[in-house]
Image (cartoon, rainbow, N blue to C red):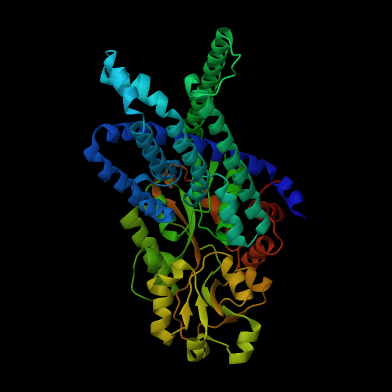
Amino acid sequence: MNFFEYFWSIRNQVLDLFVRHIQLTLIAVCIAVLIGVPIGILISRVKALNKPIIGTVNVIQAIPSLALLGFLIPFLGIGTPPAIFAVVVYSLLPIIKNTYTGLNNINSETLEAARGIGMTKMQVLTKVQIPLALPVIMAGIRISAVTAVGLVTIAAFIGAGGLGYLVFSGIQTSNSMLILSGAIPACILALLMDFVVGKLEKVVTPISLTKLDVNMTREKVVQLKRKRRVTLSVIAVILVIVILAVGLSGISFGEKTIRIGSKNFTEQLILGNLYADLIEDQTDIKVERKLNLGSSSICFEALKNQEIDLYIEYTGTAYGSLLQQPFSTDTEVIYNTVREKMRSDHKIEVLDQIGFNNAYVLAVRQDTAAKYKLNNISDIAKVSNQLIFSPTIEFNNREDGVIAMDEKYGTHFKDVVPIDGGLRYTAIAEKKSDVITAFSTDGMLKTYDLVVLEDDQNAFLSYYAIPMFHEDTLVKYPELRNIVSQLNGVLTDDVMRELNYKVDEEGLPPEQVAHDFLVNQGLIER
């Protein structure tokens, strides 16, 4: 399948995400303008505020966008609010600076003449300074609008939607066509935004500052002004419609609705769609998919704050990373501890284990295994100082990850280069790294024909998949207990590995793989 065929097959999804991307971008830019222009006016009039405000905005620009999004989650949750907030703060700098520059660079003689004919300070500002500074101000808004398109792409990391969902999904699954399906429309949108704001810049620029035809009559000038007013009215109506659409998008209007989240790798995307399809087919509950959210901590915070109602976690992650419990290899102790503490400490209900164990493993290429005679992690520890290790970012920072492995096996790699998603497999295939962390059910282990090393000293926890609900959701919809349990025992290690392979190697969308599996199992109708 070539790119155009693939793109056409997911055109409806791309269109939905494209519209969502436009909504988020316009809302953020409008808010940034409403904040940035007044601040620019303020610092042009109160000189003492110039350096502190510009300095603060510059510092904000230096904060990595993903770091800011992660910081905002405990305060604003996931989805639209933190996404818009982040895009707004990153869009302020060019608007504030251009407003300040435009107002300060007006000819002093012009201002003196305005005051000389009796204009008040407010009249000078509104009738002289702002109109004359509009071209410069609009240039700043134009820069912010184009930049916002890219920033909204990153906001998909916290469930805000938009074309970034396709980009992140493609990265996680090493699907270049999926990446392009998100990236190309995003580039087109950036160019479109630049074109539209450029046209808007011409419309709002005073006629006296534009180059007019020498033969322009008074009647034609009046017509031009009328045309500009109509154009501005149309733009205003469009913005109102967009704002209302975003505002109403989260309102269910009496519908039964739950939100299912997932982390940002293939298996999680499949699981999220499996449970969403199953619930929608067997109940009258509408499921809102908040998939590809990122790390465990993001999903966990979202569940605690009731930003989502369900996501699939793993016992080892919940036990070691989320609850910070002492190391244990007893699977029963791990599960019971997670179940009890989640309920007592966080009002989260942990249901029965689904049945498969997606444990952490180390994987190497066939040539690396043969060269160093590697069968288990004890073997690799002896030669680790000659190898480059690429764990996931989360594994590299977890007490039960790299730290536990180093303590147990005494590994000391030549270099540690954390890489997330399917890019780890690309790196090891191209010999940019020698060892990666993987999950035992990863389909790409088969795709890249990697050797899985045995955890012979049990350094890693068990990672049995478990559905986690906020307790209020199960009180409201108790029927969900029996519905989600239908997949218990059906999803085994081999089954999950095969489903992951269909996405990672065959390039099928996770939602299609999930739907087809449920149909083949007779759990839903086609």
Q: Position of residue 236 (x, y in %)?
A: 50, 23
Please state, as top left, top right, bottom left or bottom right, where the N terminus lies in the image.
Answer: bottom right
Query: Can residue 486 be seen here?
Result: no
Which x, y percent locates residue 8? 73, 45
Observer-nearest residue: 266 or 334? Answer: 266
The quadrant in which residue 395 appears is bottom left
Q: Is residue 401 above or below residue 303?
A: below
Residue beneath the point at 63% across and 54% down: 179
In front here: 514 or 46? 46
Q: Residue at x 54, y 83 (%)?
A: 454
Along the horizontal axis of the image, is 321 left or right of 112?
right
396 to the left or right of 346: right
Going by the image, does 41 lie left or right of 240?
left
Q: Is 161 displayed left or right of 41 in the figure?
A: right
Q: Quick one: which residue is furthest to the top in this view?
A: 219
Residue at 56% x, 70% y is 424
Residue 338's spot in the image, x, y percent? 39, 64
Where residue 123 appears, as percent x and y from the top left, is: 31, 18
Q: Nearer the viewer, residue 484 or 194?
A: 194
Q: Is residue 475 visible?
A: yes
The quarter of the picture where residue 449 lies is bottom right
The residue furthest left is 48
Q: Taking 336 as reference, is 21 above or below it?
A: above
Q: How many marks?
A: 0
Is residue 238 depicted above or below 64 in this figure? above
